[in-house]
Image (cartoon, rainbow, N blue to C red):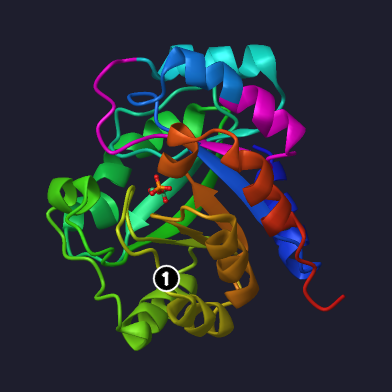
Amino acid sequence: MTQQIYQSLQTAKNQGEKKFVVLIDPDKIRLGNMNKVLELAVKAKVDYFFIGGSLIVNNMLDQCLTSIRERCDIPMVLFPGNSFQLSYRADAILFLSLISGRNADLLIGKHVVSAPYLKMSPLEIISTGYMLVDGGVPTTVSYMSNTQPIPANKDDVALCTAMAGELLGLKMMYMDAGSGAANPVSTSMIETVSSGIQIPLIVGGGIRTPEKALANAKAGADVIVVGNAIEEEPELILEMAEAVHSIRVGV
Ligand code: 1GP
């Protein structure tokens, strides 16, 4: 199994470059919007697509992956909300452990069930510590996972959680305020966590403006993920990608 995507993330981190990711939820994206999003993503040099959602009710995952691949080469990374959201048509999968919560099933249980399938798959598997941070509104993820997010002002709790995940051998951290969060993860929490870990840090949830995307990247996020805002206004892709890609730390 190659580690192409992970290696490219690590190289970018070492060089102080930032990556911009568009989250596509196969349940929510409208077909008309999808074509527009893909066209703009190519133009904006979006680095990756994350594909997933906490429910996926319409069984469109395979179709969504196929239609993206027909139109562009941007790598597709599964961001699964549950163990049914697997497909060999993607390039990689975030093998998520919900380390902000204390639900054993989402820390290791589901992983035991899906491990044999993943071992056989051609997917690049990237073990990722998933940290839900309170975004001001109850999110689908916190309800479905039956876990409490990390309080938004507890930077130290987030830091210790991320450090523990790194020490356990997880290869990336994903701090997420949840899709459609009213309050995205604060720059202060991003600074605190990024300064305490060496692995790539992904940040998403409730990012609605290029300014916030830029501020997060400056604060230490290596990868910025945006979903909702782009579903509503696809043109935002251009400005957001430009803002994130404009950063070269140490140059
Ligand atoms: C959610 O981080 C992602 O898991 C993206 O959130 O849809 O609010 O951009 P938004």
Q: Position of residue 228 (x, y in %)?
A: 41, 41
Residue lying at 26% horizontally and 67% vertically, measured from the top left: 134
Q: Name the image quarter holding the C terminus.
A: bottom right
Residue lying at 50% horizontally and 21% vertically, measured from the top left: 33
Q: Nearer the viewer, residue 5 or 32?
A: 32
Q: Position of residue 28 (x, y in %)?
A: 35, 26
Q: Position of residue 38 (x, y in %)?
A: 62, 24
* Magenta stretch encompasses residue 161: no
Amino acid under label 1? Gly
Q: Secondary structure at mark 1?
A: helix
Q: Name the image quarter holding the N terminus.
A: top right
Q: Nearer the viewer, residue 119 or 8?
A: 8
Q: Is residue 214 left or right of residue 110?
A: right
Give the vertical position of 65 relative to 236 (above or below): above
Q: Is residue 227 left or right of residue 213?
A: left
Range drawn in magenta: 37-59
Answer yes or no: is residue 201 visible: no
Check the image and name the residue furthest to the right. 251
Answer yes or no: is residue 222 visible: yes
Q: Is residue 213 left or right of residue 99?
A: right
Residue at mark 1? 165
